[in-house]
Image: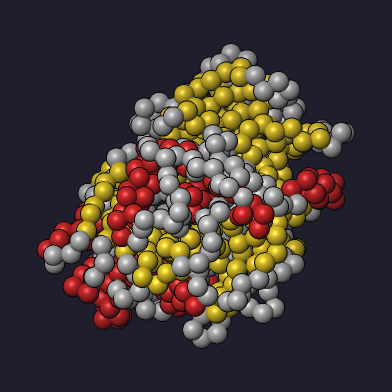
Amino acid sequence: MGFAMRKLAFILAAAASVCFGSASAQQAAQPSPPSAEAYARLPLLSSVGLSPDGRHLVVVVANGDQTELRILDADTLATQRTLAASPGNILREAYWLDDNHPFYTTSAAEHSNWMGGSASQYRQIGVISQDTGRTQLLLGGDSWFSIDAHAFRGLIAGEPNAAHIEARNESSPVHKPMIDVFRVYLDRPGQELIASGNENTVDWVLDDNGAPIVRADVEAQTKHWRLFRVDGMSARPLFDGFSSTGWPPELGGLLADGGLAAIDYDNPVRADQVLRIDLSSGQVTTFWQTPDGSDLGGLLHDIWTGRVVGVSWTDDFTREHFFDPQLEALSHTVAAQFQDGYSTINEVSRDGQRALVFGEHAEDGGAYYLYDAPTQALRRIGQRYPELTGAAALGDREAIKYHARDGTSIPAYLTLPSGVEAHNLPLVVLVHDGPHQRVQFDFDWMSSFLASRGYAVIRSNYRGSGGLGVAWANAGLGRWGDGVEQTDVDDGVAALVRNGIADPSRVCIIGVGYGGYSALVGATLTPHLYACAVSINGLADLAGSIRIISTYQDANSNWWRLQIGDWRTDAAHIRAISPFEHVDAVAAPILLIHSVEDANIPIGQSREMAARLRHAGKNVRLVELEGGDHNLSSEPSRLRVLQELEQFLGQTIGPAAQQSAPAH
């Protein structure tokens, strides 16, 4: 199996679909699909780090519904040490500080009653000694801290047991928690404040030795941001500007020549350029830009020094470019072994002899590999989803384009059940979160599960999605609900129906987060189009939420006003696109699923929507997920979602065509 080229009638005449799977595979007898448990399992390996000397690995492993850290010998893959997450915590990432100290991040939820019951995810960083097995939690004591792994800037020169870390002090006495820089220790508890931000500080840049050199401040009310050059206790203005939300460019760190790398995602014209900011003059120049105009996905760092060494972006797959010629050559050499998929270079040992690689082939859900430069050999460390291989488990995946009602070409991905004729199938419209995120042509556990049960699944990069250029993203501003962010999704259904792939009477719209909102819009504003709707961690009371958010003056509220409008001036339109206001129009069954610990959208949104639907006499079911978060990153919550979907779809647009699922 590999790539096969196939055209569908609704594809633009100038473009063919790219397909995972083959005609011969579709004709062959198909085995029974894997169980729901196989799709619900967390990736067996969710994070892998290579030690600087290339001799050890640190991995985060899913062990049932628990996560644990393991230190492995890179040659034998034998486990040398294991650390399990404490109750109520999830291990997220693990990397190395030096040859002896891997560090890891954990997250835990803290509940409040804001907006009907919400949760916040707080993160902590810990370090473990490979020699002794001793663990040390960093940034502890009586204060809450919120951090990400990228904020850990490495060891301090001349101090092997000390490091600097950027963190938000959630216990700060000011109204807005400040982001500060702390000195932490690998061999004892406690931290020291070395650089303090103010209530407007949103980011720092540290040099190779961990010293703060740039501070970024935001004045959300004026949407004005400033960068300051920091030298010890002094700070002088370096560069400033305005943006639609008030956020400054994303500061990535230092380039090899000492300039500061940044990406201006709020640029009104383009976000495909790496900018270089001179730390002496503040002069800004274009350092690099994507070859196809795609938005940059992020900056790639040397994990040992923090220097920016490359960039990533997405066309259909994740792509990478390295500024160093040797790293770029390594990337191309590895990519040649994944011509039916894609690969990324995650880390390289200090001597350049070993590289940690992630790659995905057409027949699997991705795996981690060790690449040996002298022999050019790849050795697999482990697959993310070892139970899910082949077309019967993954489905036949196609990259397609269809015409929206105004003639615009909309890129999308179609997953079809393998071994079943693509004609008159029940269709699931899976709407992505964001809405400024995007979907890409790689493994998606929910799409593959649904295809294995006989459903066609379409995921569109509707206007408003990110990654396809600033103009594409901005086309969705203010166009939620009754605009192109919704009609582009609806038009994908029409295209599949016109071409005989989808049965128009058996279409269900499903989504997580913004996608959940979109599903409820489908059920309320276009009830004739969808036979059912499923909102997972979705926003329901848009009008009520915006009314609350509009009272704040920060970058987050600026973003909401940009996307939706201001309650004070756009109240009528916001009510018109709020599902909560239109429950009387609902004609199809609705399934609401919400994580109790969702830190993005409070569970109160679904509780209130369910109550209003019941009061209106509508067919609704509410499922509350204990221990789950917004991204469904716990195994029990994922399994419950799949089981509920399988039952609900079977009752509404099923039974799924010609394939029987095994008993749970």
Q: Position of residue 568 (x, y in %)?
A: 27, 77
Q: Residue furthest top?
A: 132
Residue at left offset 13%, top offset 67%: 616
Image-based side of 550 in relation to 99, left or right: left
Image-based side of 56 in relation to 502, left or right: right
Image-based side of 525 in relation to 554, left or right: left
Residue at left offset 63%, top offset 33%: 382
Image-based side of 324 in relation to 319, left or right: right
- In the foreground, 257 or 576: 576
Image color mode: secondary structure
Q: Quadrant of residue 396?
A: bottom right
Residue 294 in view here: no
Residue at left offset 75%, top offset 52%: 339
Vertically, is 8 above or below 230? Answer: below
Residue 376 in view here: yes
Q: Residue furthest bottom?
A: 406
- In the foreground, 224 or 151: 151
Q: Position of residue 608 (x, y in %)?
A: 20, 58
Q: Position of residue 422 (x, y in %)?
A: 53, 64
Q: Please state, as top left, top right, bottom left or bottom right, where the C terminus lies in the image.
A: top left
- In the foreground, 581 or 453: 453
Q: Position of residue 235 (x, y in %)?
A: 58, 54
Q: Quadrant of residue 526?
A: bottom left
| Total marks in image | 0
- In the foreground, 143 or 353: 353
Vertically, is 203 above or below 541? Answer: above
Residue at left offset 38%, top offset 41%: 639
Q: Quadrant of residue 58?
A: top right
